[in-house]
Amino acid sequence: MSKPIEKNKIVVTGLGIITPIGIGKDEYWESAIHGKSGISKISRFDVEGYPTKIAGEVKNFNPKEYMPDELANNLSRYSQLGLATAQMAVKDARLDFSRINKKKIGVSIGLGDEILSYYDEKTAIENNNYIVRTKPPTDNRNTSNIISDFFGFSGQSLIVATACSSGNQAIGIAKNMIKSGQADLVLTGGVEAPIFPLILAAFCSLRIMSKRNDQPAKASRPFDKDRDGFVMGEGAGMLILESEEKARERGAYIYGELAGYGATSDAFHMTMPSQDRMQICKAMSLAIEDAVLDIRDINYINAHGTSTTANDRGETKAIKTVFGDHAYNIPISSTKSMTGHLMGAASAVELITCILAIKNGVLPPTINLD
């Protein structure tokens, strides 16, 4: 007897991913399980004079493979990555738009400073510091609008900008859009393209980035005692969410259920997390409660694991607080050791990593944990 369909279950039916270690879910996963590093010296502009000269750049990405030439030429790097991964997710989900009401399809995207990067990129090209395309981007719509317009989705189209949690927040909002009946299906995830002079300089000024410029592949080392800061990266991760009922009606492949979500705020400091870690603990507890699970049901954690002194120590303490003795039975790894910190895209990429780990029965490593 087949398992009855629960109308309130939200499932994942499509994936799209671009990272410094791979384009597309197959290439990405192969690199991840073999511990490949995507960190190298920045090639896009002259980094002389910057304390940090390394990042996780996406190599061999041609946006014109995913969209018309004119559109690709006019979009920011953010929107190129976002639209390309959206295309991947839609294709992976095998969506037949002749049988789906586009008025009930939403878009919820997490990202960082897209507008700031637009001006930084435009200035850099005009100054001939580097060439990304034949002319500066002229389409300054945000990524969510561009995706909605490209596919003709007329449901809610949202941008979420909450720094490193942007992708997760966008996915949580997408889940609630479906559960509340506002959408039948939502394309959701995160995108980040911060590797530009002004943004690099801004993060360098915070003194929280690795300066291991002579060993780029060894620079991002979450939880290692010799870690000296995070490494910036670019990329995008997109997912198709829909109700289990709708997914089974159209015969979709289901990667898994998005069972629980929790979100809080430290209300403490712009960049420094609160040392008591209570809101991190609460967010994890809320997600477990939302999923109607027990802490002992959790058997893998893909950590935030930024490779900064403050985060890694505090995150470890928070996990031990929530899970108690069971924390010592849970495998934990950080994808950022390989990709660098993808910021607004990080949590979406890491959710896809968890989905692929469950699908393939293999957990990705934390590299550089010596």
Image (cartoon, helix red, strand yellow):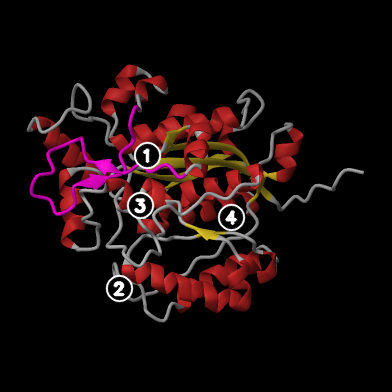
Circle nearer the N terminus (2, 1): 1
The segment highlighted magenta reads 35-60
SS for tag 4?
helix
* Image coordinates for residue 88, horizontal then vertical, percent: 50, 30
Residue under pointer 4: 176
In this rendering, does residue 310 appear at all?
yes
**Whole-Å distance between the Cαs marked 3 and 2?**
20 Å
Q: Please say if the residues under marks 1 and 3 sit with CB atoms less than 8 Å apart.
A: no
- Disc number at residue 269? 2
- In the rendered image, the quadrant that contains the N terminus is top right
Residue under pointer 1: 20
Residue under pointer 3: 341
Judge left or right: residue 186 versus residue 47.
right
User: What residue do we see at 52% from left, 72% from top?
Assistant: 319
Task: Give the camera-side residue of 313 and 352.
Answer: 313
Question: Given this view, does label 4 or label 1 mark the residue nearer the observer?
Answer: 1
Question: Given this view, does label 2 or label 4 mark the residue nearer the observer?
Answer: 2
Circle nearer the N terminus (1, 3): 1
For residue 135, which quarter of the picture? top left
**Whole-Å distance between the Cαs marked 2 and 1?**
30 Å
Q: Does residue 94 sit above or below 258 in this rendering?
A: above
**Whole-Å distance between the Cαs marked 4 and 1?**
31 Å
SS for tag 3?
loop
**Whole-Å distance between the Cαs marked 1 and 3?**
10 Å
User: What residue do we see at 23% from left, 46% from top?
Assistant: 54
Asked whether 59 falls inside the magenta stretch, the response is yes
**Whole-Å distance between the Cαs marked 3 and 4?**
27 Å
